[in-house]
Image: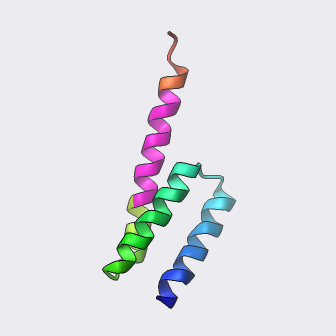
Amino acid sequence: MKTTVTTLVFLAAAWASAGCSSKAFYGGMIGAGVGGLQGETISGALIGAGVGGMIDQMEEEQEEKPK
């Protein structure tokens, strides 16, 4: 559990400094929590952040399209 908390704090600091979107950040946090249950905290965080980032990109593309 201590490793999971340390990883979450590190990931939160990394995403905040990188200016990542909220969906990527929260996706990473959720993924880290789920992955931590199976001992794969970092992998879960990266997968969650990737999915959140893809959702943000799709939303931005929808906003940019002329209607």
Q: Nearer the viewer, residue 6 or 34?
A: 34
Instruction: Give coordinates of residue 31: x percent, y percent.
Output: 41, 65
- Residue furthest right as drawn: 17
Give the extent of the magenta segment.
48-61
Instruction: Give coordinates of residue 54: x percent, y percent.
Output: 43, 44
Residue under the point 48% across and 33% down:
59
Residue under the point 34% across and 82% down:
39
Q: Nearer the viewer, residue 38 or 53?
A: 38
Residue 59 vs 15, above or below: the answer is above
- Residue furthest bottom as drawn: 2
41 drawn magenta: no
54 drawn magenta: yes
Relative side of 14 to 63, left or right: right
Instruction: Give coordinates of residue 22: x percent, y percent.
Output: 58, 51
Residue 7 vs 11, above or below: the answer is below
Residue under the point 56% across and 69% down:
11
Q: Nearer the viewer, residue 14 or 3?
A: 3
- Residue furthest left as drawn: 38
Residue under the point 66% across and 60% down:
16
State the count of labels. Answer: 0
Instruction: Give coordinates of residue 33: x percent, y percent.
Output: 43, 72
